[in-house]
Amino acid sequence: MIRDIALFLVYLVILFLVAKFFGGYMYKVFQQERTCLDRFLNPLANFIYRVTGIDAKKEMNWKEYAVALIWFHVFSFLAIFVTELVQGSLPFNPEEQGALSWDLALNTAVSFITNTNWQAYGGESTMSYFTQMTELTVHNFLSAATGLAVAMTLIRSLIRKSTSGIGNYWADMVRGTLWVLLPISILFSFVFVQQGVIQNLSPYVSITTVDGGSQTLAMGPVASQEVIKMLGTNGGGFFNVNSAHPFENPTALTNFMEMFLILLIPVSLLFTFGKMVRDSRQGHAILAAMTVLFVLFLSALYFSEYSGNPTISSLGVAAPTMMEGKEVRLGLGGSSLFSAVTTAASCGAVNSMLDSYTPIGGMIPMLQIMLSEVVFGGVGAGFYGMLSFVILTVFIVGLMVGRTPEYLGKKIESYEMKMVVLAILIPSFCILFGSAVASVTEAGVAAINNQGPHGLTEILYAYTSAAGNNGSAFAGLSANVPFYNLTLAVVMLLGRFGVILPMLAIAGSLAEKKISPNGAGTFQTHGVLFVALLCVIVLIVGALTFFPALALGPIVEQLQMLQGVLY
């Protein structure tokens, strides 16, 4: 246990130290100040603008920004969808992977444009190298850059006054992709290859095992996809077993680096936010709230898995109690931390089987997603998700003291609150409504592998993962059927754009407002009281919304497990 706790502390310390530096770098990128990469990237960016006819200096209002974002994703969807349907006729397909069914192709295309990367298929047995490289890996960059772009609009809206302009979507996308995502992806791809992650275009290799059997080893361009799937909090994986596969995650060092990459940009963005609003305490306060919640959830997950299943303990073997469903080479700490990190962010990568966790241990990752993934969250998405709770918090405080609520000098009025409520309720509605429909229909129930509360948890986790644009799977659910491919696709779209559009509307509204100077009655949003209130609001909203569903699933299963009843 001591070694595991030391791992958690080392991880957080290194993450925060690097994030402070990288947050300053992102500030320069989006403020268009000089950086060390300008010499190499400015010509490339200008070439992109020239070829596409983009005026990168033209400011957009929030509606223009939203229209550009939606059209870009429409064409992105079509590119992925069509490629998947004709991949059998395209190059770089040594295993002659055929076309996907239309419903699976639709689900996968929606998944990758929404930064969800939910995979109802085994990557090595379904996708060609061409599809993996030109569509899935590319959109790992583009969907992450979109989240970062939306976050930037909200920050600009808080520092600008009496203007309708919130930035330029195309310029934000280019700078986020070229200056932020691409350099780190290139660097860590080399590091991953050195550690043993494969990167090739070779046909699959057949070998003879030590016991004389035969086995086929999947090959492919894995390292280049592995980095951006983590850095962009995309998740998914080249292989079906994801980051439990030794070709994706071969060593304890790669396991640590993958966890580090997942939260690097979400944490760095809070330092960027502090610098852009010229008050670092504002970013530190939100970071403190996220960290408190993360430590709380990680502790609950770890100690639930450490305590294990009493039925297995009664057999007189201690190790399986803690290690069921986890990698022996990574240990309980490496698996628990990975599970907490990947669901704190909108990253669906996993290195252990959540379906084999204790009921409470499996509930914690799901609960983190249910809370709109505001515990650090995805690239950009975590920031604007938490900002909705920040606005809700200052609004509630304003009601308590009888004063018009303000955040950084911008008045929070009825329009902003309507949009905040939409951004919070749309994913919640999708989770509960989708799970309810699936749990009472023949097509939904037929896909689960377990009955009772565990089966309900499998369904609940699938819709939670889709609505939260996480993409991790609880397993035990045979999701590659038309019912789940179509309903989860709808939920992924609503979970992504049902939050982005209200937040863009808030950005447009706030940018048009004047900045009021602080007064004697101004509620300070950088102290311990604010951090505590923000944490409480996040937990209360989550508890009131999802407690009944959780009580019917993992909570009652945990109580039954203690009585020796298993599913």
Image: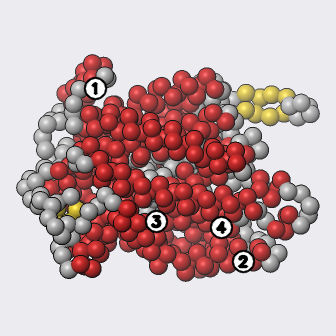
Residue shown at 48% from the left, 25% from the top: 187
User: Which residue bears the numbered disc 4?
Assistant: 360
Give above or below for 150 relative to 24: below
Q: Quadrant of the C terminus?
A: bottom right
Q: Can residue 377 be spotted in the picture?
A: no
Give the spatial CA distance, label 1 vs label 3: 36 Å
User: Which residue bears the numbered disc 2?
Assistant: 559
Give the spatial CA distance, label 2 vs label 4: 10 Å
- In the rendered structure, which disc, 1 or 3, sits on the residue that comes first in sequence? 1
Crowd band around label 2 with a 10 angstrom C-alpha radius: few (<14), some (14–19), many (20+)? few
Q: Nearer the viewer, residue 99 or 411?
A: 411
- In the rendered structure, which disc, 3 or 2, sits on the residue that comes first in sequence? 3
Give above or below for 560 relative to 214: below
Res 362 quadrant in image: bottom right
Residue shown at 70% from the left, 73% from the top: 558
Q: Secondary structure at mark 4?
A: helix
200 horizontally vs 377: left or right: right
Q: Position of residue 211 (x, y in %)?
A: 92, 33
Res 508 quadrant in image: bottom left
- In the rendered structure, which disc, 4 or 3, sits on the residue that comes first in sequence? 4
Q: Nearer the viewer, residue 513 or 446?
A: 513
